[in-house]
Amino acid sequence: MVINYLEVGIFALVAVAFVAITLAIGSLLRPKNPYANKLAPYECGEIPVGDGQVRFHIRYYIFALVFLVFDVEIIFLYPWAVVLEQLGLFGLVEMLIFLGLLVVGLVYAWRKKVLRWV
Amino acid sequence: MVLFFLLGSLMAVAGASGVVVARKPVHGVIGMILNFLGLALLYVSLQAEFLAVVQIIVYAGAVMVLFLFVVALLTAHAKPPAMGPSPLRGQGWRAGLVAVLLLTALLPVGVVVPGRAEPWEGDFGGVVRFGQELLTTHLLAFEALALVLMVAVIGVVILVGRPPQRRRGARGEGGS
């Protein structure tokens, strides 16, 4: 069974190698002449303003936390989707209850206006 | 099988030491992602397919987003600590010595108790089997989990949500 995952490993290896080889060929062939203007970050042709690493607003954090909860929900959709054909309507109702309970949380967050950007 | 274990444990150890060694927090986060991928590989080699998927999607995905948020919130303009003399004097090698002693104490356990060498037969641990068990036998636990997740969302809203805005004639500026 583990050997089935060898394909995934080969796929990952090919994906990494593709990028690495392309970049390596590029760095071998291109002329190398860096100067300060060329190394500056590209901001649509404008002169860059401020630092690249900006401090995020704390208000984004709540989106990350809510995302974490719904990510856990997604993880349970995966085995459900695999066995849905065998379970039929029963499985569908189960998942609807599951999602319904989570939507209650989402509606609560919505009503409390935490999802709205001022 | 052994190949999977070797690759997975190598990735996990490399990622973990990367977390410890990295001077910049963002590099530490990347090392941690490598660590999680290695752990997922170990789970696959133990026939725990679903756990491997959870490890990648929840830990390497969502939890890492939280880590990156904290890093971006706290250390955006912080300089990496200068490589001066370390404030720790001698604690480093003592901790290493204790770790080596603990590992040597654990080594006989691994030798004496051989553990399970042959794989589980059938589709044990597979996603299909897991889904069937979850949605039929353990249905109550599954739905209770939705309840727990709902409580988690509401808890997040209560803890870090906006305090109720007091009405003072006109609308407040909204800045908090």
Image: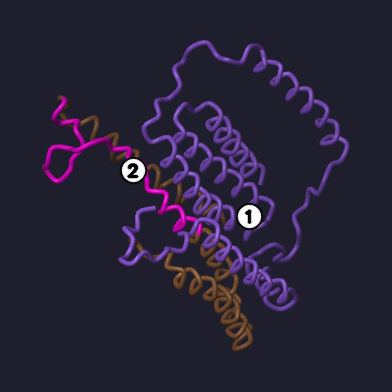
Chain colours: A brown, B purple
Q: Is residue A45 magenta?
A: yes
In the image, residue A79 above or below residue B52: below
Which is more toward the observer, B69 or B118? Answer: B69
At a point 66% along the width and 75% down the height, the residue shown is B143
Q: Is residue B111 left or right of residue B79?
A: right
Q: Is residue B170 left or right of residue A106?
A: left
Identity of the amino acid at label 1? Val
Q: Residue B167's quadrant in the figure? A: bottom left
Q: Position of residue A62 (x, y in %)?
A: 46, 57
Q: Position of residue B141 (x, y in %)?
A: 72, 71
What mark, if any, has residue A19 been given in the picture? 2
Q: Position of residue A13 (x, y in %)?
A: 45, 45
Q: Mark 1 and mark 2, same subunit? A: yes
In the image, residue A96 above or below residue A40: below
Identity of the amino acid at label 2? Val
Secondary structure that dominates the magenta span:
loop
Q: Is residue B137 left or right of residue B150?
A: right
Task: Name the residue at the right extreme.
Answer: B112
Q: SS for tag 2?
A: helix
Q: Position of residue B2 (x, y in %)?
A: 67, 42
In the image, residue B70 above or below residue A80: above
- N-term-proximal mark, 1 vs 2: 1
At a point 65% along the width and 67% down the height, the residue shown is B148
Q: Residue A113's quadrant in the figure? A: bottom left
Which residue is identified by label 1? A2
At a point 84% along the width and 34% down the height, the residue shown is B111
Task: Name the residue at the front extreme.
Answer: B169
Q: Is residue B52 magenta?
A: no
Q: CA distance from mark 1 to mark 2?
A: 27 Å
